[in-house]
Image (tube, rainbow, N blue to C red):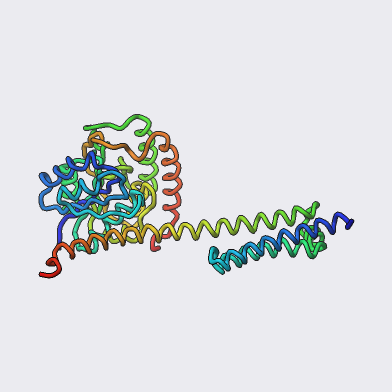
Amino acid sequence: MPSPEVRIQAVAIAAALGFAALTIVLVRRRKLSEWYSLIWLAAGGLVSAFAIFRNVQFVLAEAIGIYYPPVLILGSLLFMLLGITLYLSVVLTRLEAWNRRLAQRLALLEYRQQRVENSAPPPGQ
Amino acid sequence: MRDVLAIVPAYNEAASLPLLLQELAQECSGWEVLVVNDGSTDRTGEVARAAGVRVIDLPFNAGIAAAEQAGFFMAREEGFRFAVRLDGDGQHRPAEAARLLEALRGGAQVAIGSRFLAARGFRSPLIRRLGIAWLSWLVSRLAGLRITDPTSGLRAFSSEALDLLTRFYPEGYPEPESILLLARRRFRIVEVPVAMRERSGGRSSIRNSTALRYILKVTFALVIESIRAVDT
């Protein structure tokens, strides 16, 4: 049986690849846009990078003064997720504004169309 | 140029609209009336059409602010000089709305009907008055002018004010924020004492359970508005 280090490395890489595969499947089925898929692939890539290059966490953790290196992985992933969520809230806010504006324009347009139809002579006359 | 468009945002107000629309026709002849049906699930749209006023239907319940702003768009695009905004629930009296208009003809650009400048008519429950007192202090402080009834929805706007409000209009319950928005751009805002009635049907969209949340949201929004750049 391989050492614990190698086992966890294998699990982490498998999980990251699985996540990346799911992202690709969603883009392929047009359930997710190419742009957002890139963001999620980057998140998966971050996890894979830490898993593949195990020594990076020790070097980086030492450099910025983190005693327990795995916290660096968790911390950077958490920070990235926070960033993505904030970005999505910004997108959502914009979509809400557009949605509201569309509803208003539609209502006004329907009103004007009704008025034109009511003032025009009925067809066939 | 057309003169006055009365804008009545209405969400499930079929019970109270007929009286309001009848009073508008009697007491404010010469005004055009627009009911903005905000995705009602009752007969609001039919009741309003039966009264012979303009009606537009938002395709879903987009919220009071979106409904009002849809009315502002119509007022601007059809060249009305003034727009008067009244609640659909009957608490705003058309005769009082007409007094707001006098303030606009006297040179104001925004007129707000205040229940507190003169103590008459229906008074809100204590808890609501406390909330209003806080917002009144905050809005007055930030806007640099005395506002006694910042949540009042009985308002009249000149076309210049409508120009601004079709571009920027706060979300949710927009009344206190919109005062600050206008005041920071030096619009001439006046309060006019009015009496209001208890709503004649339906239910308030701000109930006590949500009142605290409303106060918090509006307080935060006011502070943010006060640090926003004026020219954007």
x, y percentage for residue A118?
Answer: 15, 62
Residue A13 appears left or right of B198: right
Q: Position of residue A110 (x, y in %)?
A: 26, 61
Residue B48 sits above or below residue A110 on the image: above
Quadrant location, the N terminus of chain B: bottom left
Left or right of residue A67, residue B195 in this image? left
The residue closer to the viewer here, B82 or B211, is B211
The image shows residue A74 at horizontal and vertical percentages of 72, 54
Q: How many marks?
A: 0
Residue A103, quarter of picture: bottom left
Q: Residue at x 13, y 64 (%)?
A: A119
**What residue occupies the far front of the structure in this picture?**
A124
**Residue sitting farthest toward the top:** B126
**Residue B36 seen in the figure:** yes
Question: In the depicted view, which residue is nearer to us: B117 or A40?
Answer: A40
The C terminus of chain B sits in image quarter: bottom left
Which residue does the image show at 68% across and 57% down from the upper left? A77
The answer to whether residue B187 is above or below residue B126 is below
Residue B164 visible to the viewer: no
- Answer left or right for B92 relative to A37: left
**Is B81 displayed left or right of A109 in the figure?**
left
The residue located at (65%, 56%) in the rendering is A79
Q: Residue B231: x and y, percent?
A: 38, 63
Residue located 37% across and 49% down the image = B177
Q: Nearer the viewer, residue A2 or A64?
A: A2
